[in-house]
Image (cartoon, coloured by chain):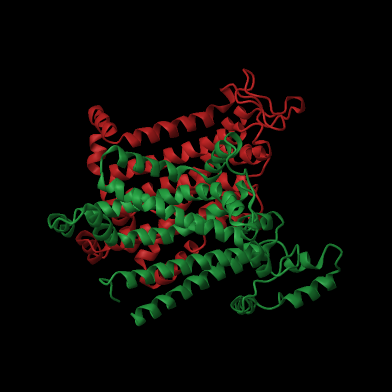
Chain colours: A red, B green
Amino acid sequence: MSTVVANSTSFRSTVSIMRRHPGLVFGLVVVAAMVLLAIAAPWLHTLDPTLIRPRMRLKPPSSEFWFGTDASGRDLWSRIAYGSRISLIVGASVASASLVIGLVIGMIAGAIRKLDGIIMRIMDGVMAIPAILLAIMVVSLFGAALQTVIIAITLPEIPRVVRLTRSVVLTVRGEAYVEAAISMGTPTQILMIRHILPNILAPVIVQATFTASAAILIEASLSFLGIGTPSEIPSWGNIMADGRNYFQMAPQLIIAPGLLVALTVLAVNILGDGLRDLLDPRLAKSVGDAR
Amino acid sequence: MVRFLFRRLLSIIPVLAIVSIIVFLALRLGPGDPAAILAGDSATPEMVAAMRAHLGLDQSLPQQFLHWVVQIAHGDLGRSITSNQPVTTLVASRLQPTLALAIATIIFSILVATPLGVLAAWRRGTWVDNLASGGAVIGFALPAFVTGYLLVFVFALKLQWLPVQGFVPLSEGFWPFGRHLVLPTLTLSTIYIALITRVTRASMLEILGEDFVRTARAKGLPERVVLFRHALGNSAIPILSVIGIGIALLLGGVVVTESVFSIPGLGRLTVEAVVARDYPVVQGIIILFSGVYVLINLAVDISYAIFDPRISY
């Protein structure tokens, strides 16, 4: 890890890292493009994504409406451009929330023997409920709002971070320098932050990228099912939900946002694979295999 | 062996207990008073209170929980708020499409993914491997709604080989039943095939480097025997466990796939129940799906012990 950081200061080794990890480059480029699309949406030949034009229903692609219009006469390209915001917000929020919460719970489980058993049994229980179903249950109880959707998707992702964190804590705790620190009377909190946290960060950051892609996928699925992000907000899943009844006439209503979901998920996954190989090849087995 | 079985059986109890506590608490602590909903819009406060007493909602939370668990243990998942039918009856009426889809997907995925993974590992670094590995990465990122609609577009709308959507029960003949199942199965299989191919390839690569494989080749065994009996036989455990873990993805995928193809199964029932805020039905299905997931993984674990004589507990 430290050698990577030191090397990357020089341009030549950055190029060599990029050459050795083409996936990382592909992932970064696509994710950067998505971020750009989300930020610059208002200036990319977009119109009001929610403006309904009754006389312009289901128009084919044209110079005014790049991707055509949907069944309410809304501009598909504008909806897709603005919709990228929801996917990125959900991906980033779920990844960071589950990372922070999972880290804290995982470190507690790894450090305090008394709580370990009970915490891990609870995590086993949460993991026994398929992620989409747990999210569906939360959304059904608290109604569809963007925050609810984010919480609903975060919940099933937490146990994976907890398990990973705990396993790293348990491994690191046996290392000589940690035992030395303990024998010198270092308080547990400082021990955790100074000696254990740096070891956990690499695998957990890799896990966070996989969490982000899973979150984007689940948000799109929930919205597609009509039980995710509120339907008045343009999100890729909502665009597809609206387009379902018109698939035969205007397949682009589903294919275009669908392929973008797939491309984003693919790019973030490949980015995660690249990060994993770059940060720690030994991780290849423990992180992100079967989600 | 018997002791292992017993211990493993006991170990699912805390998991199931936690699952039921989560589902129970989510419903009781969530907004909305089930008694008020069941009593109807025109109910007086007295009627709501009577309904609450009738449902046992006036008892303490732990009492309610115990009562509820005893009910589930008796196979009673409660009643739907909207149709007033028992949840078990509703589930039973929607079971066939989901079961057919899930079984077809599992069989198809294993039949495609295992040979693919073996081939990719055997021909490591060649175009076959690149195709299989790259395909697995892409397949893992393809959401069911994308695969589903692309397949419908090509095979149902353009080529008109297969029906666009719907489900025909087996009782109306195998041919229509099978025709309607092809596209949903392909859709749901994508991610599962990707997952199994990846793990099969990885564990085969590991095994193919072992000494006993070299010995088997050196003594002149046909490559087919070396690959499938020696190598695949010894990579069975990671493959089996990913098939078990993947069931969670499969159950989640069922919900989306059934929605894409308008299949009247448990996935559609879940979505309908959520839209109608029919909590008991949502609760029942989640308990059922989680129970199935836990039991399948239990079966997978037990099968290791049966198939692999090296594992002794």
Question: Can you say whether B20 is above or below B182 in the image?
Answer: below
Q: Would you say residue A173 is visible in this rendering?
A: yes
The residue at the point 36 percent across, 61 percent down is A166
Question: Can you say whether B268 is above or below B72 in the image?
Answer: above
Question: Can you say whether B304 is above or below B180 in the image?
Answer: below
The residue at the point 48 percent across, 50 percent down is B189
Position of residue B89 measured from the top left corner of the image (x, y, whole percent): 68, 68
Q: Would you say residue A291 is visible in this rendering?
A: no
Q: How many marks?
A: 0
The residue at the point 45 percent across, 43 percent down is B141
Of residue A68 and residue B55, the one placed in the foreground of this image is: A68
Residue that extends furthest to the bottom in the rendered view of this protein = B3
Where residue A9 sits, quadrant-wise, is: top left
Position of residue A149 measured from the top left corner of the image (x, y, whole percent): 59, 49
Of residue B104 and residue A242, the one placed in the foreground of this image is: B104
Question: Can you say whether A277 is above or below A177 in the image?
Answer: above
Quarter of the picture containing the N terminus of chain A is top left
